[in-house]
Amino acid sequence: MIPVILSGGSGTRLWPLSRAKKPKQFLPLLNEKSMLQNTLLRLKGLADLQPPLIICNEDHRFMVAEQIRELATAQATIMLEPVGRNTAPAIAVAAIQAMAGGEDPLLLILAADHVIKDIPAFHRAIELAIPAAEQGKLVTFGIVPTSAHTGYGYIRRAEGSDETLPPEVAAVAQFYEKPDFATAKQFVDSGDYFWNSGMFLFKASRFLAELQQFAPAIVSAAEQALAKAANDLDFIRLDKAGFSTSPSDSIDYAVMEKSANAAMVALDAGWSDVGSWDALWDVMAKDEQGNACRGDVLLEQCKNSYVNAEERLVAVIGLDDVVVVETKDAVLVAGKAHIQGVKNIVAKLQSYGRTEVDLHREVFRPWGKYDAIDSGNRYQVKHITVKPGAKLSVQMHHHRAEHWVVVSGSALVRNGDKEFMVTENESTYIPVGVIHSLENPGKIPLELIEVQSGSYLGEDDIVRFEDKYGRN
């Protein structure tokens, strides 16, 4: 069995913590591990498990690789989508890749950004689904609903038993899109409907056969994308021209809603897709007043609220049912009843061209990270951290000069035609137009303060001549 982890989501409803360049699957929302890391860790203990296959977009590739490295688990295969085409094409390339060696494994399809509290129950559901998947069924996991939720799709379990299926596995009668509240209440009260989790188990060949029947253009595009794929460091980079020809379609629309082989295992394991701030509040531990907090938070006369302080003390007085999220460069304050309006804020930020919709003030790179701590007319100050053994690209800027001051560690600097070491409390100046590079040859992180000055300070003022991470 190969876990296939879909990690292409943007998580905009959890802004300002989740942003396009670092969405929710890479954030530690419930504990010290990210959502992606928790997804991988909860697989431990499943029998006959192969290394995972993770599908993400190009912008996130180094975060995926770094978070896997932090877990010190078996190496995963990381496939890069050149464009977003929804879940069906992503799973198609995973299935073709899984069968490349002549085998026909089971594929366990999981999202990178779900919460599952009861891991033993999750494992039992997978074990119950395996025999049906081996028989050629496309098994989905239907979540036992706890409320009439209008944010999820629903699955109706077929009445009666199917002698061809194990007793714990039911045939699927129908899939339903997100209903209104009255319909959702009818669904839940009947006992025959389950939330659609978006998790699946099936044989790679069976999925491809059904996809070929219902959406052959997706199979063709996936085959083209893999046939011309390129190995790039630790990644498989799918061919953009081939993958772009695929229709954009979910696995539900493309296959599951049309298949006569759809089956379901009920899952009651504290599942959530954490699709909004109130959903996150719902799965977090709370105090006696129903408040869920992270960071340096002080509350006075507050109930049923979520407060997240990332950088500084946040005090809230006399407010109930609110969400307060503080980051280095943005603060969100909202009533929980209106939290779906976050998507409207994100849309406005996009229309205004604001960087806060894509980037945090702290930006991660394959070599480390930087924090833009101050800026003004013709200057910008960054706190840069370079990982041991990492190196920034050999580059040049047309419009800015840079002054580097080492705070801790040692830097190997190329400045024009000279190469030299810069250690703590020492500095160097990079004039406009001079080719330069920065490397950490030591065993501890290198930290420095960079002062940029010039007529244009955008990140796109970089001419790269050499880069160990394959960036242009």
Image: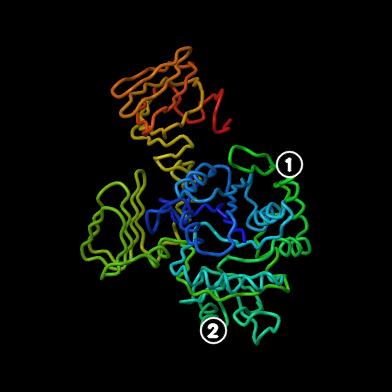
Q: Does 70 sit above or below residue 377?
A: below
The residue that disc 1 covers is 228
Of residues 314 and 341, which is closer to you in this image? 314
The residue that disc 2 covers is 191
The percent position of residue 165, horizontal first and vertical second, equals 67, 79
Quadrant of image for the N terminus: bottom right
Using a 10 Å C-alpha cutoff, classify the residue at mark 2 as few (fewer than 14 neighbours), some (14 to 19) or many (20 or more).
few
Q: Does 440 sit above or below residue 18?
A: above
The percent position of residue 238, horizontal first and vertical second, equals 67, 44
Q: Which mark is residue 421?
A: none
Quadrant of image for the C terminus: top right
Q: Amino acid at mark 1?
A: Lys
Q: Nearer the viewer, mark 1 or mark 2?
A: 1
Q: Amino acid at mark 2?
A: Gly
The percent position of residue 375, horizontal first and vertical second, equals 36, 31
Residue lying furthest left:
300
